[in-house]
Image (tube, rainbow, N blue to C red):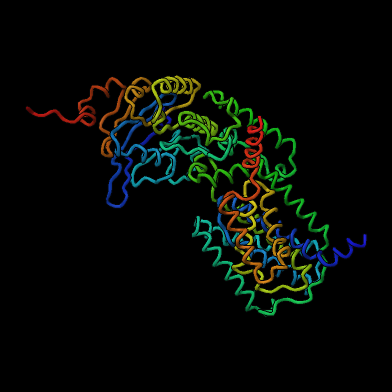
Amino acid sequence: MEWFNDFWSTYSTLVFTVGVHALLALSIWLTLSCGLLSLANAAFMGIGAYVAALLTVNLEWSFPAVLLAGAVTPALVALLIGAPVLRLSGVYLAMATLAFGEVVRITILNLEITGGPEGLNGIPLVTEGWHIVLILAVTIYSLARLRRSKVGRAFEAIKEDEIAARLMGINVDRYKLLAFTLGAFIAGLAGALNAHFTFFISPREYGFENAVDILTMAVLGGTTTLIGPMLGGSILTLLPELLRSLHDFRSLVNGAVLILVVLFLPKGIWEPRRIRAFFSRNKGDQA
Amino acid sequence: MSAANLLSIRHVGKHFGGLHVLQDVSFEVPAGSIYGLIGPNGAGKTTVFNLITGLLTPSAGSIDFQGASLIGQQAHEITHRGIARTFQNIRIFKEMDLLENVMVGMHEHLNYGPLALLLNSGACRAAEKRARERALELLSWVGLDHKADMLADNLSYGDQRKLEFARALATEPKLLLLDEPVAGMNPSEKTILMEEINNIRNRGYGVFMIEHDMRFVMGLCDRIAVLNFGRIIAEGTPDEVRNNPEVIEAYLGKEDAA
């Protein structure tokens, strides 16, 4: 057991981060599954993290209440900005949500209660491993249920052909808003969990780069299943650690891996249809 | 309002800026019949469909379905009222299998709540099961039930049209709008589809179609309207329309005075 204790004391934060990144990747998977290229999830994560941390530090709310508030607040913000923003589609939506993300980051940077550029320090370390596992499990279960229901079919239909979806009787605007809001809820939850094991948060963690990172996780892993985004999130968290010995070349190799995946596996690493096809082809060769 | 008319279009006009696509278009689609709209390319036929289904709003006139106006309703609301359509350029959901394609059409009729969905309650499971069975039944109407779990993208062109057909029926429409249902089909496929459309009418649906293929339209429709340059130039039974001099002129051109 000793080796485990050593391992855990060094790497527990990393393991927690893998869980949080899996949640974030799932949050953007949800909006992507409805055909929305939204880059607001880093900002929603930031709102969740700050709301949760401030409630813990200043008002000493209980942890479950803090998590709930950290998820509901960004969801409400998403509901508000969703109505105007979701009229856009494609890259225009990406631009508008990026702009929203910058507004959030700069607001946090300039408020007094958030500690401005210095961030928030001394957030109690109350997140435990099983919190993350439990929340991840509930999220996966709920999304899996959603996928197999009329809601998941409506999302998929909207992604493939919005006009045809409308004419099948689907209230497209309402379902887009639902995907956007639920995505914000999950991202906020990830932010709230994250804030309570890193001790410190600052506006820098929720900017443009992080928004792109979250998108990359989902795209790298593949968005056809729920496993893909989680796999992508884990790889992008662990890869920099594994490449630590390369020092300055780290981000270079990181980038090269991304380019290779996008070039040769455009639908992501985890794509069951391709994997099945690969194995059945090999079997065919032997026969 | 006469109960016999499913759809009434009165004095409908549509212009995009200075371009008048439709002017003073009026006709009535009776219940329980097959109605055809024909006309040369660019006459404005698909625009008529887009106005009925709420993708466009008319610049003038009224469109009533079962005695109530459709103007100002959103596309999905019009579908809920009982109008479904297929598209000239097929718009199936290619990344879904056939069963899912048809089940998307049942969206409005699956009324379980979010909690039932999350907990996978008995009511939710039963509703999904009913929807799956109904979808299979609709696929069997068009002869595609044995391909139910195939990806829609892998279907042949003719089969994709049939799938669109089944998907439109899944919304439980009272009136089915078909935009060039036999475009790109070979003669034997056309004959089969003709029978299928007749069957669908006999099941009590109203059918309103746009079609170029004269033999197909004349053989199938109870009444036909002819659209040319955005105006209705003739309306009546296939025989009346066939012998109308203005229709012959629109299709074949005018004979020289000599």
B251 versus A123 height, above or below: above
The x, y position of residue A39, in whole percent, is: 58, 61
The x, y position of residue A162, in whole percent, is: 50, 46
The x, y position of residue A138, in whole percent, is: 76, 51
Can residue A189 be seen by looking at this rendering? no
Q: The N terminus of chain A is located in which quarter?
A: bottom right
Exactly how many numbered labels are in the figure? 0
Q: Nearer the viewer, residue B162 or A57?
A: B162
Residue drawn at (34%, 32%) of the image: B27
The x, y position of residue B40, in whole percent, is: 28, 34
Snapshot quadrant of residue A81? bottom right
* Residue at the farthest left position: B258
Q: Nearer the viewer, residue B19 or B77?
A: B19
* Residue at the farthest right position: A1
A121 versus B248 height, above or below: below
Q: The C terminus of chain A is located in which quarter?
A: top right
Can residue A8 be seen by looking at this rendering? yes
Q: Nearer the viewer, residue A273 or A122?
A: A273
Snapshot quadrant of residue A202? bottom right
